[in-house]
Image (cartoon, coloured by chain):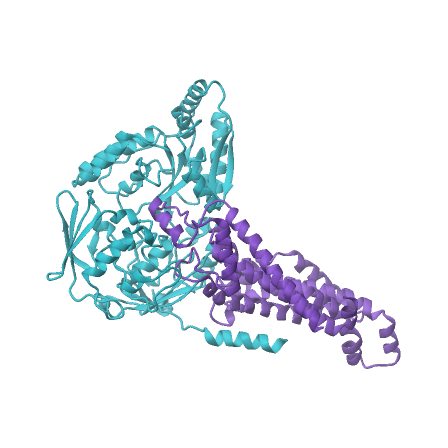
Chain colours: A cyan, B purple
Amino acid sequence: MANPSWLTLLLLFAACSPSRAELTIANGPDVEVLDPQLANTTAAARIFQALFEGLTRLDPLSLEVLPGLADEWHSNESATQWRFHLRDELKWSDGTPLTLEDVQESWFRLAAPATGASYADWMRDTRIDLFPDDGWLVVYFPRPMPLFDRMCAYHALAPIPKALRLAGPGSLPDPLPSSGPYRLVERRIRDRIRVEANPYSWRADSVGLQSIDFRTIDSQFTALNLFLTDEVLYTPNVPSLAVPKLLAKFPQIYRPAPQFATYFLRFNISQPPFNNQDLRLALSLAVDREALAKQAGGGRPAATTLVPQLVEGYQRVDAPSFDADKAREHLERARLAMGGAIGRLEYIYPSSELNRAVAEVLQQQWREVLGVEVALVNLENQSFRPLQRGLEYQVSHSSWIGDYLDPLTFLELFHSYSSNNRTGYSDSSYDSLLDEATARPIASERFELLAQAETMLLEQAVVLPLLVDISQELASPRLHGFHRNAAGVIDWAALRVRSTEEDKHD
Amino acid sequence: MTKRFAKRIISLLISILLVHAVAFLMVRSTRGGPFDEERALSPQVRLALEQRYGLDDPLPLQYLRAVGGLLRGDFGPSLRYRDTQVSELLADALPISLALGGGALLLALWIGIPVGLLAASKRHPLGAGVAATCSTLLLAIPNFVIAGVVVALFSFELGWLPPAGFGQLRHLLLPWLCLALPLAAQIALLVRARTTETLQSAAVRSAIAQGLAPAVLLKRYVLRPSLTPVLAFLGPATAALLTGSLVIEQVFALPGLGTFFVQAALARDYTLALGVTVVYTALLGSCTLIADLLMAKLDPRVEALS
């Protein structure tokens, strides 16, 4: 009995003992689809930033838009028309030419419902003209797209190779041609994705590391163990339990910074009881965010705005702040309007350590300030989402990560037509503020209108901002060229790894 | 014997079909679907996806299609790993789970049997006490706690082994240890109980009186009868080991089947969830079958009775 099993084991290990990559990082949960139009997790974004380059890309230091596969671009005044010039002689990682048609076909595929892309709306109803002789491409939108150059840096809009465009369900082209500074060597599901420098990248000369391993590590504790034993040089997040110790022991390495992401509450205003604005205001004013952040935030600061305060030139719009007396006044008014009794209230949230801690503090604050008992309902993610989407809830946990650095990516959620609205909020004046803002090419004017919209949303207490999400990256001091930023942008080509010896001499 | 074996195989196949049907019903009656992501899909996109995967067909038709796939050994494309077939995912993960479980099982036997014999021995009362106490203690500690302790010791204090990872033999040593220790404890206690009994039996006492060499005595008269309960226990234990390694896979970041099992259910990856369930059912069934066959070989009374 013993011999065959040992034989299997030996064979197994003979088959897979990979050499070490120059850099190994913990990349969080598994990336389920290696298709930049289909996967939209932050873990996937890190890999796509190495493999697929957009027409533009973002500077990891300033988050400014830099040339990517396109070296030149501009829009018309109303931002309904964008022209891009592709670099000359671009190639996929298999040496075949990367053409204007690749861009056009990729964007058509993104828009096609059959693709199943969640960003399909971005390219909906567009027309694309190609001018292959001088390398220009013109895209016409039926609506103004003032931020399209910035959006082009996001992987959903990066051109993808023909093989991937034609791949059916359940198959991945092998090899997978890519356009970024790296190309795919190996993908072992639930284990790792190995990439190597792409000799055909237009910036191949500036690529530092020859190979990178993106390790799938579900457990944040495991990732932390690997980081502390130098097995990985980067991990995207850390367990909340470890935060106080990390802050005290590794202030240089663990530096949490605000992300372009907010943790907030949604009220279902489509039906009683939360169609009553006084009740929403009562619950909102009764929340002491500072106390919440301290007790349950796991290092996250209190959020007073829905749009994180990271957009230069955008004026902050504060939600009503903690005021126990005013909260009780609104509660009284709500009670009168509802005939004396409020009935049973319920708060739903998807299971997680953080969500549970926040829910319990909220419940306690509502009880203490208002004397109102709110039942907590803990659901797993896939059960939570249809309830929230189908407006089958009263109050619910919410969070959102901005797609691009602009207030619109948060405010458009609550447009009447948005499939991510999930509150039942539908206000024509709110919609027209957004529509008007998108049509204004001058940033200051847009921001003015968007701030008005955010004010409406917060004054009517449709949502209640609670916490600012933070980046919890741990990056080893040996990792050079790494810059923390609010959008999770990493320029893998710019990274270098110093040996432990060099490190010790400092 | 052959007839009985064939009967067992057929009943195993029927159980697989039944479990598959129940699992299909359960996974399809839970709320939410595989395409409920944080960023909502537009209705057209959602519809197109459901059409593509045949999720818009009537449920009975989908079930028949799933059974057809099962008979061909093709579970279709995964709904979450949309560029991969379920059978590919299973084929990659199964050997890892087998290596993890198989190694742990061997280790558990190597540790458990000698410790059990020691615990039953009257000649070393101190050793017997320590062995029995340690076994009982280990039995009570969940394996994720053991994992924390061995990582703290071997990775951080001593720096001998990596705290997690996969690809080389050294990556499996700690997971093996964590999975094997509680099992070894159970084996030790079983061996101890039966050995104590055997040592007092008439056969052994007369063998001692005949002046048989201790080694022969141990091998022929003590070990063989003492191992029967261990074998009976090993069938279900192996299955539990193979299917229950989820926590250890997570802690040590091993790409085995256990994680798929839980994540597929949570993510409503219907095809993958069904695939893993079928593989687990088959594993469970064959482990029990093999253990029964071995037991019959070791102790003819077992076959006579059944």
Answer with left or right where residue A167 lies relative to residue A272.
left
Q: Give residue A29's quadrant in the image.
A: bottom left
Q: Residue at x 83, y 81 (%)?
A: B212
Residue A496 lies left or right of residue B36; in this view the side is left
In this view, A326 is above or below A392: above
Q: Is residue B40 above or below residue A391?
A: below
Q: Position of residue A412 (x, y in %)?
A: 29, 39
Using the rendered view, name the quadrant where residue B224 is placed: bottom right
- Is B49 or B243 nearer to us in this picture? B49
Residue A157 visible to an observer of this rendering = yes
In this orientation, which residue lies closer to the viewer: B210 or A189?
A189
Q: Which quadrant is the N terminus of chain A positioned in?
A: bottom right
The residue furthest left is: A134
- In this rendering, the answer to whether A56 lies above or below A380 is below
Instruction: Give percent across and percent down for residue A460.
Output: 34, 28
Image location of residue A182, percent across then percent down? 29, 66
Whether residue B145 is visible to the viewer of this picture, yes or no, is no
